[in-house]
Image (cartoon, helix red, strand yellow):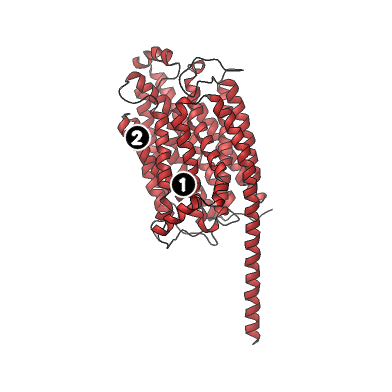
Amino acid sequence: MLSPIPKFELLCAAMLGFAQLCMNTAFDAEAFILESVIHSVHEREPDRIDPYAGYYGQAVIYGSFLTTSLFTPSLLNIWTPKILLVISSFCFAAFPFGFLFINSYYHYFSTVVLGVGKAFFNLGCTTYLTSHSTRRSIESNVSLQWAIGCGSLILGAMILGGMTWISEDRGFENLKNSTDIVEHSGGRVFDDFEIRLLSLVLIAVSILAVIIVCLLPSEDVENCIESSKKDGSVIKTLKLTCSTLISPKILQIVPLCLLCGFNASCFMSIIPTSMHFNQNNFRMTYIPAVYGLGAGVGEVLMGMIVSELSKRIQGFGLKPTMVIGSVILTVYCALLHASTPMEAPMRPTSGEPIWFYQSYPLIFLIAFLAGTSDCCFNGVRSVICALVMPSRRAQSFSVSRMYQAAACVIIFFFSPTIPLYIYTFGLPILAVCSTIVFFKVVNSTNKMERKMTTETWLEQERNSSEREIKEKC
């Protein structure tokens, strides 16, 4: 049995997780339905916004995120991780305002701002954790923070479910008259009342995120992996980030970063959109709530399992977690392939599935498995980035997210033209390749840590011997 994790470290990880929960609730809830909502608005008012602005907007988010990530490590020389988190919380809060008045101008503006906020949050989150964790506790703290943070999926599912129930109960004329639109589009239609109600609730949750972030403890823990206080040059740090982009050690984890990006894009947006665009599901109005609940339960449960087992089994948050994530990804891709029309990710369709139709239990299961795989991949990426380049942790965190964001930009930009089988066959193949490369990276990292530990021990022994000689003299 390993020694327990100090309570202060757990408190910091838990508070950061709750901040992430509130900040991501708006983004996660809207990501599930964004393309469907945009499609609904476009069918009512074609000149108001492009029908694929949901996909393209998310491409802009990750494009902005990718660009900003190049500069964020330099900001740590003048700002602390907590300041980055505070700024990011305001950027996240700007996004749900767009649902109050959907139009192309604010939609794309808010996606740019959100991309900046995501870059600030991801670096602020990882550097805050490394300054409030030791080498012994990093795996557990990362998993705990991620598990709590992914409760945003559950909270978002509750909000979406409540929104659907209220809208159905209203029975307003605009909902009754939406039958023609449903039959025409072959998918779920969202009316203006639903969209604005969702926006107001998510704005309130975003404000709560700002409050929690401001209350985060600032003091570093003793023997932390890396101090939050920096005294380097902004220009020097920027050059270091650019050199890290092509560092051999970072290039080894690029397959894992691409896997995180492709998998997250599919599970957060493309899969739920394909379920909405599937005409066989058009009477299943609670798909966003059921899907969000399944994804959230999967993320939280897997995060808790990894966190607990990492306390008991050294290294569980690396190789074992990676294998588990790859196996689960393959299973949910198989279920998705068998139950979804091939054209569903691209447009509303009345096509037939290969084997069986979707139902609420199946949708929950697919979302649950997708959530657990996402938790596994993001967990191992965070841990390996903290270990693979000890002298460039901030840079490795940002660069890994840049590669992940690049994958998201690619997949969202081409989503309107990519059929289902590209995702369901491509993701498992990428997962296998990433696992093989990841194992090699973990082995080399372990060798590096053993070498550093040996050198440190020898240095301490040498210093001790020198002191003894001096004392005798």
* Relative image position of residue 253 (x, y in whole percent): 57, 46
Q: Which mark is residue 297?
A: none
Q: Are marks 1 and 2 in contact (CB under 8 Å)?
A: no
* Disc 1 crowd, CA 10 A, few/some/many (<14, 14-19, 20+): many
Q: Secondary structure at mark 2?
A: helix
Quarter placement of the C terminus: bottom right
Number of numbered markers: 2
- Residue annotated with mark 2: 108
442 lies left or right of 417: right
Give the residue at mark 1: 122
Distance, label 1 to label 2, CA atoms, is 21 Å
| Residue at 38 percent of width and 13 percent of height | 176
Residue 213's spot in the image, x, y percent?
A: 42, 48
Residue visible at 67% across and 50% down in the picture: 312
Dot 1 or dot 2: first in sequence order is 2
Residue located farthest toward the right when viewing the structure as drawn? 1
Residue 470, above or below 378:
below
Q: Is residue 127 visible?
A: no
Identify the residue at horizontal 56%, vertical 33% (top origin): 370
In this picture, residue 437 sits left or right of residue 213: right
Residue located at (62% from left, 54% from top): 445
Three-letter code for the amino acid on which mark 2 is drawn: Tyr
Q: In this rendering, is residue 465 above or below 307? A: below
Mark 1 residue element: helix
Determine whether 439 is above or below 45 in the image. below
User: From the viewer's perspective, is the residue at label 1 or at label 2 nearer?
Assistant: 2
